[in-house]
Image: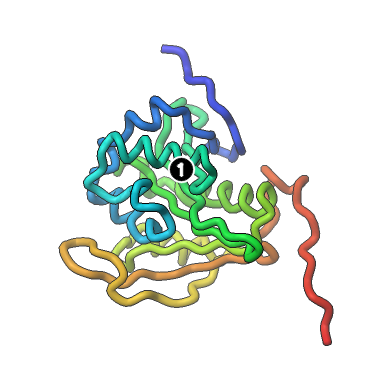
């Protein structure tokens, strides 16, 4: 079977960010009824419209609505592809893009349990941030995840600081997961704190700050 032709946005060491194609994107609707994936994606859905939800139960029609929201640039959707295996291993989203604040919320999920814990999420997340800051000109990104999402918490504490991310607080009882209401951690990164990324460093412009006094 021939490898799919991707609409490549950015390419990292192992992961490619690509724009979604309608049919394969919509056809993945059943994967989003995986409870573990739902926990990974659930905290950030508040910025998305009800029609473009990613929490289960998910229907084909809701995936179509999410694709339409992407086309309308209400939510930017990225597919995560592995170079060596020519397969889509996850999705990422930029939602709640607001001007002139130049801010947005990042959400990311890796589909299969066997692909989690391989560092694919942090690599893909760095690509999304690089695109947001250097491609779109955003200034602040945030991400939110349930405190019980051990993988996300571990990844942020291990590598988030090196990428400029800081935990800024938590929201009490903000998500329903594991059969109960759980707290949600909130992390943020500013463009000036995010290190240059090889994929977009040629696009980086100086950060303009207000004069003192």
Q: Left or right: where does residue 66 sit relative to residue 166?
A: left
Classify mark 1: helix, strand or loop.
helix
Q: Left or right: where does residue 126 sit relative to residue 205?
A: left
> Residue at 36% across / 61% down in the picture?
43
Dividing the image into 4 quarters, which one contains the N terminus? top left
Dividing the image into 4 quarters, which one contains the C terminus? bottom right
Tell me where residue 169 sits by quadrant: bottom left
Q: Is residue 17 above or below residue 128?
A: above
Q: Callout 1 environment at 10 Å: few (<14), some (14 to 19), or many (20+)?
A: some
- Measuring from the top left, give residue 68's x and y in whole percent: 44, 38
Tell me where residue 113 sits by quadrant: top left
Which residue of the protein is positioned furthest toward the left in this rendering?
179
Which colour scheme appears in the figure?
rainbow
Q: Nearer the viewer, residue 46 or 162?
A: 46
Q: Is residue 24 above or below residue 135?
A: above
Q: Report which residue position mark 1 lands on.
A: 69
> Residue at 47% across / 28% down in the picture?
21
Q: Is residue 168 above or below residue 11?
A: below
Q: Nearer the viewer, residue 74 or 38?
A: 74
> Residue at 61% across / 51% down in the picture?
132
- Measuring from the top left, give residue 83's x and y in whole percent: 52, 30
Q: Left or right: where does residue 208 sit relative to residue 104?
A: right
Which residue of the protein is positioned furthest toward the top in this rendering?
1
- Measuring from the top left, give residue 206's x and y in whole percent: 80, 60
- Measuring from the top left, give residue 191's x and y in whole percent: 66, 62
> Residue at 32% across / 33% down in the picture?
28
Q: How many marks?
A: 1
């Amino acid at each position: 079977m021939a490898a799919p032709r991707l609409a490549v946005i950015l390419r990292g060491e192992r992961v490619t960010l690509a724009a979604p194609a309608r049919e394969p994107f919509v056809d993945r609707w059943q994967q989003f009824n995986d409870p573990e994936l739902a926990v990974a994606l659930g905290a950030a859905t508040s910025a998305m419209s009800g029609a473009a939800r990613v929490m289960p139960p998910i229907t084909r029609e809701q995936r179509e609505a999410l694709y339409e929201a992407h086309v309308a640039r209400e939510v930017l959707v990225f597919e995560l592809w592995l170079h060596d295996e020519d397969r889509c291993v996850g999705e990422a989203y930029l939602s709640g893009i607001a001007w002139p604040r130049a801010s947005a919320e990042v959400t990311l999920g890796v589909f299969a349990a066997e692909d989690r814990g391989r560092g694919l999420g942090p690599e893909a997340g760095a690509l999304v941030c690089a695109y947001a800051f250097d491609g779109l000109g955003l200034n602040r990104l945030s991400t939110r995840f349930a405190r019980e999402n051990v993988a996300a918490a571990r990844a942020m504490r291990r590598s988030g600081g090196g990428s400029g991310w800081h935990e800024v607080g938590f929201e009490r009882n903000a998500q329903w997961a594991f059969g109960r209401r759980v707290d949600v951690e909130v992390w943020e990164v500013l463009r000036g704190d995010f290190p240059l990324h090889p994929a977009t460093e040629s696009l980086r412009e100086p950060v303009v700050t207000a004069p003192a006094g």
